[in-house]
Amino acid sequence: MRATVDPERACRLINHGPTVLVSAAHAGRRNLMAAAWSMPVEFAPPRIAVVIDRKTYTRELIAATGMLALCVPCRAQADLVWTVGSVSGHDPELHDTDKFLRYGIGWFDGPALGLPCVEGCVAWMEARVIAEPHTEAAYDTFFVEVVSAQADDRVFADGRWSFRDDNTELHTLHHLGAGVFAVPSRTVAAGLLPVRDA
Amino acid sequence: MRATVDPERACRLINHGPTVLVSAAHAGRRNLMAAAWSMPVEFAPPRIAVVIDRKTYTRELIAATGMLALCVPCRAQADLVWTVGSVSGHDPELHDTDKFLRYGIGWFDGPALGLPCVEGCVAWMEARVIAEPHTEAAYDTFFVEVVSAQADDRVFADGRWSFRDDNTELHTLHHLGAGVFAVPSRTVAAGLLPVRDA
């Protein structure tokens, strides 16, 4: 079910603009947040830009380690995404626990960096931060290079998402705002326009 | 039908990761390309990052002027998006014409900068480039600040997309690869997960 994705195809996992989950871990602590704002910047090597607000606890962990995981959640996880995006890892209510335990979120260790990857997602990447202090400070934007990529082969195979009527719960989430997500449940195959006689 | 969008809500236009069209104009020439890779980086002031390959003609025009327009195309325009994304403005076959004339693409002048905005899209923004020579060179990534924003009020109103069964042709396009686009035709409203007894 979880299958390795060729690194050169890793950017396809977020090419269509889904909301992602970002996780990080350091010195026995870990955190998980939602990020609506990410995009590939290069296919090979696979590089991604992602916006991580300076106020987040996840950012502290990333700053300490230079590593993060990006998980692509699916429709069945809409409440999970909204929850981890609404509750801060800085919240004193979390006490000694973390969002994984507080909300019963399953995880597995990423194959390359051992970062916590969320069970039930449809794709998972681990990445190393490429230090760009200026864009991190000016735009909260981190550039990262993907070092491992996996996807659920029921919905991503041969380097391509396959959103069908028989796997709707595995479709990706695209945040419209205020906890409402669009789900790309239909697809359209485009062709080339004819040239006009000018 | 075309309504002004509050600048602080402009980032909502691409928050969910649609493919966009990028246009630019300089000294009597203009061009139009597709970009799957863009994301907001800040709501206020409204700032966006967009990847514009160094080989594109559009990039030359942007470099000359420091301005670009971002249009959000819809399902009815899938062939248009694929066509302008597949044909380079450098192509000698374009001769004295441009992609607008060659393919019969209608446009209007943007209200702030006069840039060519594509008729039939569902949102339009004009933006000024914030000079970031390093990220432009290293990642083809441009940071821009939005100076005008408009949207089709049949599908974007009160700062929010409204994808419904009665406006399917106006839904946005999310590139999966090779000319296949996902269309976010369904939505899901998320709630908060209960806290587990730990």
Image (cartoon, coloured by chain):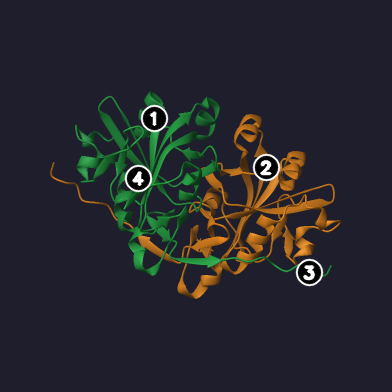
Chain colours: A orange, B green
> At label 1, which amino acid type do we have?
Ile
Q: Are marks 2 and 3 on the same chain?
A: no
- Badge 2 marks a residue whose secondary structure is strand
Give the spatial CA distance, label 4 vs label 3: 48 Å
Q: Earlier in the sequence, mark 1 or mark 4?
A: 1
> Which structural element holds mark 4?
helix
Determine the chain carrying the residue at label 2: A
Q: Chain of mark 1?
A: B
Which residue carries the number 3 mark?
B196
Please state which of the two labelled residues, at mark 3 or mark 1, is closer to the viewer.
3
Same chain for labels 4 and 3? Say yes or no.
Answer: yes
Dividing the picture into quadrants, the one containing residue B155 is bottom left
Q: Nearer the viewer, mark 1 or mark 4?
A: 1
Residue A179 is situated, as x and y percent measured from the top left of the image, at 58, 60
Looking at the rendered image, the quarter that the C terminus of chain A falls into is top left
Query: Which residue in the structure is indicated by mark 4?
Result: B85
How far apart marks 3 and 1 lie (CA) works out to 52 Å
- Mark 4: amino acid: Gly
**Protein chain holding label 4:** B
Please state the horizontal and vertical placement of residue B68, each as a whole percent of the image. 39, 34
A161 or A98: nearer the eye?
Answer: A98
- Name the residue tied to disc 2: A128
Classify 10 Å Cα crowding around label 4: few (below 14), some (14-19), many (20 and above). some
Residue visible at 46% across and 30% down in the picture: B129
> Could you tell me how far apart the alpha carbons at marks 1 and 2 are, in whole angstroms?
31 Å
- Graded by Cα atoms within 10 Å as few (under 14), some (14 to 19) or many (20 or more), the crowding at tag 2 reads some
Residue A108 location, quadrant: bottom right
CA–CA distance between discs 2 and 3? 32 Å
Q: Mark 1 — residue?
A: B62
Question: Which numbered marker is on residue B189?
Answer: none
Tags 3 and 1 on a common chain: yes
Name the quarter where the N terminus of chain A is drawn: bottom right
